[in-house]
């Protein structure tokens, strides 16, 4: 046990994802020694995050305005929607420079074990956007997990009857790597999904 | 490959054990309850990452202590492979493979080939289909990584569907169940064909293994499902060919599943069986035939792993010689000289093989 203020910080830090007891202690003792100005900046940036950031009213991306910068960008193609589980997936896909449509953040994946069904995700909001925005294609960019795949299937079953084309990201080999470094499951899937040349 | 060292802390009956076994044959001698099997169980746990007794992790922690720890180092030509597991009371276990978290637990099993012969192996013949499915699935995961991943995913999808049925019952959203049916059909068809292909592969090995333990009859596998009847030679081994059959069967069972709040049909309920000549080994074989067939199954697993890795797997023999006549014991002994072996026995003279003797007494191995 440490002095109460130190212990309180350790407890708070240890609740963050990916941070265990040991890391929390290390961080806490590091913070103990930083300049006061740095501490204030760190503290206020956490508070500002709560005050200034909200969810885009259209796609549920994080934004500081009513709508996010992607939804406001008139050059983006409104007929293609990329559906992701979490807002942090958006910058990853943006980084590819390959996608010029808009996004929709579901807020998770279907997982009955965790009590998450379609009603707990932003499915209704998605269906509403199909009509409003004239969406022709939905790309399911969910994680390649059992839950992510089930969510992609759900999107297909939900949206195809509305005349929407539903596609899913392909799974395969990392580009620029050697075959012998690929893990066997990924390579096995890539083999099953091989393409005609 | 062999286990060079094993460390236990608060694992089963052991407060602390540091064990440096011989690279060849190790015979652990001790009274019943002395803790011999616990040592074998710990070694098996390092490879399979579960108890070969089927015990839940919580049962492995020495009672009254906060966490159990198993660590072991395996020596290979390419250097040491280290597996470390910490099992906290009421928490998630932590697994390190060479100091890092393994991507998949089956990666560990594949790197550390191991076969255990257990006193309850007769249940593979006499018991229900669960033990036989486990035997097959365990071998699939050890032999074929991508197939092992399919088994794990089927299991996850099944637990999700069951959770939905249990929590929501008849009120469950039909579209959501459809989606899980699709996943189960797709993954289930893969599981089914992986199993058939595994049985194809080890059937000749099993027949030969059965003869080395004194069997003269014809030994064959059968495989019965509730969704397509009995599978046979003519059944397609293509994973794409059974998706519709499983999906149709699931949807025909939907009312019953909703009512019983669980998935009552699919590869997780399939029944792999064994026939001795034309008799069902479960109900129409003698005790002796069943014992030989059980040994045959374990020997076949050993041969299949040996073949895959070009080196003998580690072998755990938990109190098997007390039940065996010299002929059947001879079939097991044929496996012995090659790799590292751990044998437990209450009576030293029952084990007809040379090797390092260890006395197990009062939580100490000397």
Image (spheres, coloured by chain):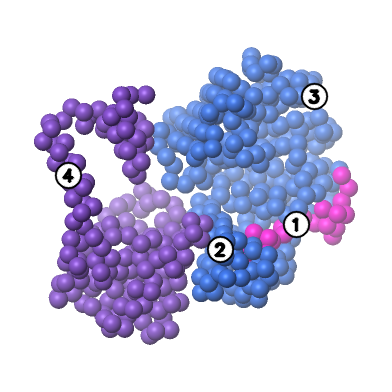
Secondary structure at numbered mark 3: helix
Mark 1 or 4: in front is: 4
Q: Are the two marked residues, 3 and 4, in contact with CB atoms closer than 8 angstroms?
A: no
Q: Earlier in the sequence, mark 2 or mark 1?
A: 2
Label 1 element class: strand
Q: Are marks 2 and 4 in contact (CB under 8 Å)?
A: no
Residue at the disc numbered 4? A44
Kindly identify which residue carries mark 3. Answer: B350
Instruction: Name above or below for residue B347 compared with residue A163.
Output: above
Task: Read off the residue under disc 2.
Answer: B164
Nearest the viewer among B156 and B66 is B66
Residue in the picture at 64% in, 69% down? B258
Chain for mark 4?
A
Could you say which quadrant of the image residue B194 lies in?
bottom right
Closest to the camera, between mark 3 and mark 2, is 2
Whether B193 is drawn above or below B289: the answer is: below
Residue at mark 1 to residue at mark 3: CA–CA distance = 32 Å
Towards the viewer: B71 or B233: B71
Residue displayed at 28% across by 28% down: A6
Whether residue A137 appears in this view of the structure is: no
The magenta stretch is B263-287
> Could you tell me if residue B126 is visible in this image?
yes
* Horizontal side, residue B252 vs residue A181: left or right: right
Spot occupied by residue B143 in the image (x, y as percentages of width and height) = 56, 49
Q: Rate crowding at label 3 as few (under 14), some (14 to 19) or many (20 or more) other CA atoms within 10 Å.
A: some
Residue that carries the numbered disc 1 in the rendered image: B273
Which image quadrant: the C terminus of chain B? top right
Q: Is residue B49 left or right of residue A31?
A: right
């Amino acid at each position: 046990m440490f002095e109460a203020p130190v212990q309180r910080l350790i407890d708070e830090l240890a609740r963050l994802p990916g941070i265990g007891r040991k890391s929390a202690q290390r961080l806490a003792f590091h913070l103990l020694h930083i300049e006061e100005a740095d501490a204030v900046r760190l503290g206020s940036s956490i508070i500002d995050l709560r005050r200034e950031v909200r969810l885009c009213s259209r796609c549920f991306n994080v934004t500081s305005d009513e709508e996010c910068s992607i939804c406001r960008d008139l050059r983006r193609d409104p007929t293609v929607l990329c559906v992701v589980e979490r807002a942090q997936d958006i910058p990853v896909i943006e980084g590819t420079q390959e996608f010029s449509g808009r996004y929709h953040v579901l807020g998770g994946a279907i997982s009955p074990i965790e009590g998450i069904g379609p009603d707990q995700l932003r499915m209704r909001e998605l269906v509403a956007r199909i009509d409003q925005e004239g969406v022709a294609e939905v790309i399911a960019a969910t994680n390649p997990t059992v839950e992510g795949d089930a969510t992609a299937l759900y999107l297909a079953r939900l949206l195809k009857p509305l005349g929407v084309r539903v596609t899913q990201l392909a799974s395969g080999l990392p580009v620029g790597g050697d075959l012998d470094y690929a893990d066997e499951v990924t390579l096995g899937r890539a083999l099953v999904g091989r393409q005609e040349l | 490959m062999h286990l060079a060292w094993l460390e236990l802390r608060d694992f089963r009956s052991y407060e602390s054990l540091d064990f440096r076994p011989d690279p060849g044959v190790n015979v652990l001698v001790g009274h019943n309850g002395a803790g011999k099997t616990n040592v074998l169980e710990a070694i098996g746990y390092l490879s399979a990452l579960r108890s070969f007794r089927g015990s839940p992790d919580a049962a492995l922690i020495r009672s009254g202590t906060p966490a159990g720890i198993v660590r072991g180092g395996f020596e290979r030509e390419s250097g040491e492979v280290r597996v470390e597991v910490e099992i906290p009371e009421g928490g998630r276990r932590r697994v390190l493979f060479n100091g890092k978290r393994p991507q998949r637990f089956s990666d560990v099993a594949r790197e550390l080939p191991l076969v255990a012969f257990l006193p309850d192996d007769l249940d593979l013949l006499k018991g229900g289909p669960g033990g036989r499915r486990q035997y097959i699935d365990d071998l699939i995961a050890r032999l074929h990584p991508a197939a092992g991943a399919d088994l794990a995913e089927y299991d996850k999808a099944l637990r999700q569907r069951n959770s939905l049925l249990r929590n929501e019952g008849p009120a469950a959203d039909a579209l959501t169940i459809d989606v899980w049916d699709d996943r189960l059909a797709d993954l289930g068809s893969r599981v089914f064909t992986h199993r058939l292909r595994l049985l194809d592969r080890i059937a000749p090995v099993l027949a030969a293994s059965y003869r080395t333990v004194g069997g003269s009859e014809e030994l064959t596998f059968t495989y019965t499902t509730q969704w397509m009847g009995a599978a046979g030679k003519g059944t397609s081994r293509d994973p794409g060919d059974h998706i519709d059959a499983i999906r149709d069967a699931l949807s025909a069972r939907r009312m019953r599943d909703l009512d019983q709040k669980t998935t009552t049909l699919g590869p997780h309920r399939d029944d792999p069986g064994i026939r001795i000549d034309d008799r069902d080994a479960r109900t129409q074989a003698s005790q002796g035939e069943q014992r030989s067939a059980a040994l045959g199954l374990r020997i076949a697993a050993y041969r299949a792993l040996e073949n895959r890795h070009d080196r003998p797997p580690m072998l755990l023999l938990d109190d098997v010689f007390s039940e065996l006549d010299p002929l059947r014991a001879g079939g097991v002994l044929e496996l012995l000289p090659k790799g590292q072996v751990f044998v437990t026995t209450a009576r030293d003279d029952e084990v007809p093989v040379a090797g390092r003797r260890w006395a197990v007494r009062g939580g100490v191995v000397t």
